[in-house]
Image: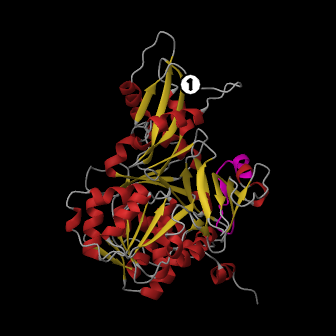
Amino acid sequence: MSLEAIHENLLRRAAVGDLISRSADRFRDKIAFVSGNERVSYRTLNEKSCMAANAFARMNIKKGDRVAFMTHNCLTYLYCFFGLTKIGAIPVPLNFMLRGEEIIYIINDAGPKAFFVEDSIAEHVLAVKNDLKSVEHFGWIDFGKKPKPDGWVDLKEFFQGDYPATEPEVIINSDDVATLIYTTGTESFPKGVMTTHLNYYMSLLHLLPDVDFRNDDVFIIDIPFFHVAGNTVLLGMLAVGGRAVIEYAPDPYQTLQKTQDEKITYWVYPPTLYAAIPTVPGFDKYDLSSLKKFVSFGAVIPTVVIERWKEINPDIQWRNYWGQTESSPVGTTSSPADFESKQNSIGIPDTGVFVKIFDENDQEVSTGQIGELVIRGAAVMKGYWNRDDLTKQTLANGWLHTGDLGYMDEDGYIYFVDRKKDMIKTGGENVSSQEVEGIIQRYPGVAMVAVIGLPDPYWMEVVSAFVVPRPGQELTEEAIIGFCKENMAGYKVPKKVFIASALPMTASGKILKRKIREEYTKEG
């Protein structure tokens, strides 16, 4: 006798929503999340996620439908995220700093049926609401800051007893898309990365042994959930039965206070925050003796920052981490045992992952030679949403081509060198130079523009624009920055604008950004 389809599916599938159910069975009344005055057990987390799942189902959200969110970190978002994964629907988290055309592009590309927005930033969605063609339901995430617009769904109602806390029975295949996270590359527009349920499960295979998540670890998660890094820490913590303090956004004072109060053991931050936190006034008064493990991602952490932390807590285990949204985000990790001797390395390939270094012909280069870092493994994305052409290009010959350049030493350790594409990494965010250039080019009187990242001790790189005026036109740094603030998210806005008479170019008419970078790095 054959199994019913749903039972056969439940028997052996890998689904993100099931991870929460299984952890609830294992850890029950153990605290999973701390947020403000709330302490949420694993059992309660699963129950509220089921309530959200059934509420979405009653809104006619079905398997494969997209549901967008634009919010800072909060418990409501987490319940909805897991609720959607339980019915096979696809969360689409947007960067809460997006504005205007940026919101319109992503929403119209993803085609979500519903869009839920934090109260304090809803004005930016209301301003473009009529341009969001696919959205049937607008929803409200209430932080108590502004009144709800008429006709918008209040997500609080999902958890007030009208929806059952029963597990929905939906056939979810392991290769189904679990999330659609938009990432900015060198193209002019963001790309939707399709990460499957199996991708997330396989990312746990490397995460748990390589970054040493344990049952007694206590995390602070204030890096945003619209980043794959936030999702990864979240799922890893829940898989092992750890505890996490959920914070609205990174705030050095809150980080220090919560670390002291909750005895936090694990931090996961870009280098900018490790550099900034010890400079906070009153830093020395906080008890940070509970800290055991640090992961740094986004860039190799400067030696001076590590030396400062050694003075603070010499027993902390350090790891450098490299990956990207397209790899869920597996890649490489350095171990504490080798961190001192290989401090500038991004580590060795993660468990279950191939990482190679290829030349322009997709042939592996020799030891010490610089090439493109490529990845192969079960955590690699399904592809880009609505971009078969770019998917084919990025996954050519059975490898994820990352666009990052590096080399491998004789011991198999990998070192990051530069970005093949014109990507700027600033404060843990990725900024496409072409996207910023495209907007500045629209400013009246601009003849030519080049945008690069210049080294910075705090941001690691700052977005810097070099602008050539049209003949007879005058441009100012203040005017260009003001125009950018009106047309793009704050983290993309250039922190430096240089008005130039000309830019170095090749014979074929391409701007030599390398020359600009070399000249201004020396001057800096």
Point out residue 371 in the picture as x, y percentages from the top left corner.
69, 53
Residue located 51% across and 25% down the image: 442
Point out residue 263 in the picture as x, y percentages from the top left corner.
30, 77
In the rendered image, residue 306 lying in the magenta stretch gets the answer no
Q: Which residue is mark 1?
A: 503
Front-lying residue, 437 or 462 = 462
Point out residue 275 in the picture as x, y percentages from the top left corner.
36, 57
Q: Is residue 430 left or right of residue 410?
A: left
Q: Amino acid at mark 1?
A: Leu
The number of numbered badges drawn on the structure is 1
In the rendered image, residue 384 lying in the magenta stretch gets the answer yes
Does residue 132 sit above or below 476 in this rendering? below
Q: Is residue 109 left or right of residue 244?
A: right
Residue located 44% across and 77% down the image: 46
Secondary structure state at the residue bearing disc 1: loop
The quarter in which the C terminus is drawn is top left
Residue located 59% across and 74% down the image: 206
Point out residue 362 in the picture as x, y percentages from the top left corner.
78, 54
**Picture quarter containing residue 474?**
top left
**Picture quarter containing residue 9?**
bottom right
Q: Residue furthest bottom?
A: 1
Residue 162 in view of the camera: yes
The quarter in which the N terminus is drawn is bottom right
Question: Residues in magenta?
Answer: 376-392
Q: Is residue 452 left or right of residue 196?
A: left
Residue 167 in view of the camera: no
Front-lying residue, 205 or 117 = 205
Residue located 67% across and 24% down the image: 509
Task: Count neighbours of disc 1 (C-alpha within 10 A) and say few if under 14, some if 14 to 19, many if 20 or more.
Answer: some
Does residue 242 sit above or below 122 in this rendering? below
Front-lying residue, 22 or 289 = 289
